[in-house]
Amino acid sequence: MAKLIPSSLTGRLLLVSMVVLLLFLPLAGIVLEQAYSNSLDRRLQEQLKVQVYGLMGLADEIEPGELWLPESLPDERFNQLASGRYAKVINADGKLMWQSQSSLNLALNTVNKSDVPGQFIYQRLVTDESQTLEASRVSVIWESTNNVEHLYTFIVAESIEPLLAEKRAFRDTLLFWLGGLAIFLLIVDVFALFWALKPLKRLAEEIRQIEQGDIQTLQTEYPTELNKVAHNLNTLIIHSEQQRSRYRNTLQDLAHSLKTPLSVLQAGLSKIDKPDAKEMVSTQVSRMNDLVRYQLQRAVSAGNSPIKHRVNVSDCVDKILAALGKVYHDKNIQFSNKISKSCIFYGDENDLLEIFGNLCDNACKYGQSLVMVADEATGSSNTICIKVVDDGMGIPEKQQQLIFERGQRLDENNEGQGIGLSVVNDIVSSYRGHIDIAINELKQNTIRVVLPGAVSAEPPL
Amino acid sequence: MRILVIEDEKALCEQIGSELKDAGYTVDLAFDGEEGLYLATEFPFDLMVIDLGLPKIPGMEIIENLRSADNHCPILILTARDHWQDKVKGLSAGADDYLAKPFHTEELLARVNALIRRSTGHSSPVLRLGPLTLDTLQQVLLIAEQEIEVTAYEYRLMEYLAHNSGKVISKTELTEHLYEQDYDRDSNVIEVFVGRLRKKLDPDNSLKPIETLRGRGYRLNSSWQS
């Protein structure tokens, strides 16, 4: 049963209007046809009655018991054989008194002894030639000149063929107009539905755009009913953004206030004389720092947020390379950003800065003289692939797995390396992305990151 | 070489100050943004270490202020917010390098040394000028590969002249770069140092390491090129 009910509102409304149409229109058709048919039948009976009265007017008793009618009647149809209109007069004994010329070979013996004189009786008859007739008869008591009463039955019958033809014509016209009406109503219905549901579709589309970061809030030019929903959704979106930003700031403040005492501890190490104690404090300080940084990044990463922004990857990487150019000034590294200007990341700019800040920083640390960032085709319209290439030694295959695990440090001398990559890995995972390390054909170290995004055909303005 | 450290955590600021002093630098300390900006604009520094989260005036604003006033003194930012967003912001505002808290003292000293070298156009921490060799990391002074014993102030004076080789340095400039803000200045002290250095570096008066330009100041022997 559940399967029969469409899941969409459009489907449901269409189903209801179709059921109404399918029930209402045939029913209306049947009622109309019935009414018309009845009225035609009655009209025919009226006509027959008039004919009977006409015959009575013409009849005269030439002598008692002998009723006379003219051979030819004014109505030509009575005079032509098998014309479809017939008349007979029969006396009480069933003896034919008179018959119209049209009914010479026709038996119209419908007389019943129990007929009440003066009462019209209608009957459907089928002739030997399979012609269906509507017959009307009435018995009248004729008072002869000798004051003897004689009973005569006047019978007038008419072929119902023209009546049936008229009914058929009416049915055809009815069918044509009702069918047309049904189609018209259906079209109007579908149009009305789409028109009425259009704002809903627009709402859904705008929500999708918000999720993808194309727009920040919903428009508020909706029909009254939806305007409230749009307004509430906007409030929710703004509130959630504010909440996230407050959350991020609070956590950063917490990290800040934890790190300053850690710095004091770290800087105070030189005053500790015992090497063991110095080593222990140093290790713990650095562990606490890594934990704070790692957990903070996990907490503030927007990867799981349903609301994304559109971030231009090339601009973001430009900022990072400009910053790193200053930091690694002495290394004379040749930086190149070959990312397409129309490459867009769906997410949070801070997360993107964190990913490529860490990856490019590592590339600068381990590379000799070259750091290159470029995009690659992914074969999917909703992901982007960015690679960071350096000409360093490369990461040994054995350690490539370990490198992304939390807190794994390949080289203790290079501060923050292990945690940096595990932070990157965490952010990328939160966006359901993917990261891998490889050595390219030029023996260059390549880290490839796949993230949600798109390369739009036209560069953004 | 005179360094300004602006850091609101007093203990950390003093620790950094003492480490830098031990490494042979002249150090001024400021504990908030306002004091820091005042010192930075009023006195000539060879490097500034600025924390980003400062009371009164934030570190970022100090950097922007200095750069818009055409002050090109190298700036090392210290930040507890080690997100790339903050690093990128700080570096694009005009800082030259960053160091995330907590840091190892060695790391700080290495960065400070590298930034000063970069600002004076030297690529190696060991400066070689004629017969003079200055190892700025070890703070060792050699003449013709012979180590010369000098005091901290004498070393600083020599290092400043070496970093600015070819330039005439006035006594005032030397005083400003060798002494902290609240030091009682007496220009005679510089003359005394120069006299002592000449004796130590050039006992037989053949090398003439420091030239005196009357009324203008001192210069490292102009024939000594790196």
Image (cartoon, coloured by chain):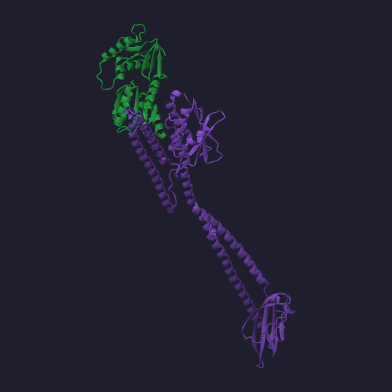
Chain colours: A purple, B green
Q: Is residue B149 above or below residue B82?
A: above
Q: Who is closer to the viewer here, A268 or A207? A: A268
Where does the N terminus of chain A fall, quadrant-wise? bottom right
Tell how many labels.
0
Specify the farthest residue to the right: A105
Residue A455 is at least partly visible in this image = no
Q: How far across and down, in percent of the image, does residue B56 sit?
A: 29, 33
Instruction: Examine the image and state in which quarter residue A92 appears.
Output: bottom right
Q: Who is closer to the viewer here, A86 or A264? A: A264
Q: Who is closer to the viewer here, B180 or A408? A: A408
Specify the farthest residue to the left: B184
Residue B223 is at least partly visible in this image = yes
- Residue A258 lies left or right of residue A366; in this view the side is left
Instruction: Examine the image and state in which quarter residue A443 appears.
Output: top right
Instruction: Examine the image and state in which quarter residue B48 appears.
Output: top left
Q: Who is closer to the viewer here, B225 or A91? A: B225
Q: Is residue A297 above or below residue B206?
A: below
Q: How far across and down, in percent of the image, does residue A225 sit?
A: 43, 54
Residue positioned 72% across, 87% down in the render: A95
Q: How far across and down, in percent of the image, does residue A322 sit?
A: 44, 29
Q: Is residue A384 above or below residue B94?
A: below
- Residue A197 lies left or right of residue A245; in this view the side is right
Q: How far across and down, in percent of the image, does residue B118 sit?
A: 40, 21
Q: Is residue A231 above or below residue A123?
A: above
